[in-house]
Amino acid sequence: MAKVVITTKFFPEEIERITREGHEVRVHEGESLEKAKLVRFAKDAEALIVLLSDRIDEELLQGLPKLRIVANLGVGVDNIDLAAATRRGILVTNTPDVLTEATADLAWALLLAVARRITEADQDLRREGFPGWTFLPKHLGVDVYGRTIGIVGFGRIGQAVARRAQGFSMRILYYSRTRKPEKEATLGAQYVSLAELLRESDFVVLSLPLTPQTRHLLGERELRLMKREAILVNVARGPIVDEGALAQALKEGRILGAGLDVFEREPEVHPELLSLKNVVLTPHIGSATWATRRRMAALAVDNVLAALRGEQPPTLVNKEAWTNRSPA
Ligand code: NAP
Ligand code: GLV
């Protein structure tokens, strides 16, 4: 019997799947626990199911010597020190694929909301009432159909964003770490440099992981390459964009608008962004649909149960921790 700790309110049927295999489950339902408290709460845990907001670093791992697996409820694993986990032989898993479509949907929801000024129009209507139909209303937006979208990070989510763009008859540009010739054909996408993508796109969508290489990939210099009528959508990670530089570019009208689901210092949001009308902000809800969250929970539990049975978890991130494991 192993102890499994979950750092968030969780689906009861998934907890039951764990207890049915004879394991003990401890759930923390309140606000995120700071490190020392989490170590105390998770004492003797062999498996941890964690949120993206839980920082899993060397010190925390040191405090949990029995730990065998950390199952992240999300695909991005920038909250986990992978090298430290691997050194200790701790398996790290994530939840890819099951959240791809929901996150691509949210990217599109933000793109459309900014282009057509949906939240601004909604707020004005609630506050001021419907002023009657006018030919040149104050909420004139920009076209989406037939324009150019530039996708930065052409993996699962980036490609799902591109599939939706096909329905809008858009010219699709992408920039990614590796070129994907087979996808260029099926999605009608063209590979370009980041600079070219920023210069050419009417909509720039970020869908790449946060790594040392991608931190502040979009700073003031890159933002200055964008068109004045361009809209930036970030459903990846906040620190990929220099948030101060972005707020300044939006304030000065150097780009038209932004749709942001992620922020540089979550849960903080840059105060200037809050006062701008040409941005739509959502609190990191890319994968937040009932069905997607159920699939994420089920996958995290599949990963934990596999690890506790001594099997390779289905969506293992640090493969070296598995290959280098000592014989049971
Ligand atoms: P993925 O399939 O691994 O795709 C990521 C893409 O980014 C890959 O094509 C990768 O290139 C590319 N990439 C990596 N490093 C790069 C670099 N330095 N420069 C340019 N491109 C780079 O991952 P995914 O499932 O699409 O998820 C992408 C990210 O979205 C996650 O890591 C997470 O941070 C974020 N996300 C956010 C939400 C939300 O709630 N807002 C939800 C889900 C995911 P290769 O093809 O060479 O690997
Ligand atoms: C969400 O941000 C994820 O990485 O799944």
Image: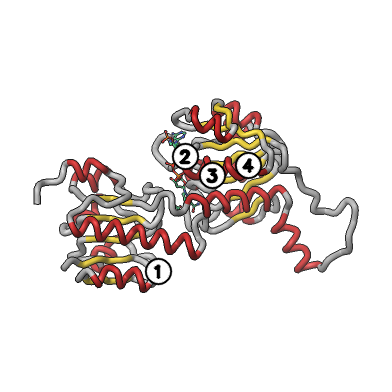
Position of residue 227 measured from the top left corner of the image (x, y, whole percent): 68, 33
Residue at image coords 89%, 63%:
132
Q: Earlier in the sequence, mark 4 or mark 2?
A: 2
Q: Residue furthest front?
A: 186
- Distance CA(mark 4)–CA(mark 2): 15 Å
Q: Which residue is mark 3?
A: 160
Mark identifier at residue 89: none
Mark 1 or 2, which is nearer the eye? 2
Provide the secondary structure element on which disc 4 rests.
Answer: helix
Q: Which residue is mark 2?
A: 155
Q: Which residue is mark 4?
A: 165
- Distance CA(mark 3)–CA(mark 4): 9 Å
Provide the secondary structure element on which disc 2 rests.
Answer: loop
Residue at image coords 87%, 64%:
131
Q: For disc 2, does the CB lie below 8 Å from ligand 1?
A: yes
Mark identifier at residue 31: 1
Provide the secondary structure element on which disc 1 rests.
Answer: loop
Residue at image coords 34%, 58%:
300
| Residue 252 in sight from this viewpoint | no
- Distance CA(mark 1)–CA(mark 4): 38 Å
Residue at image coords 61%, 45%:
164
Q: Amino acid at mark 1?
A: Glu
Disc 3, disc 4: CB below 8 Å?
A: no
Local packing at callout 3 (Cα closer than 10 Å; few below 14, some 14-19, many 20+) is some
Using residue 21 as the reference point, say whether residue 111 is left or right of it: right
Q: Amino acid at mark 4?
A: Ala
Q: Quadrant of residue 32?
A: bottom left
Q: Earlier in the sequence, mark 3 or mark 4?
A: 3
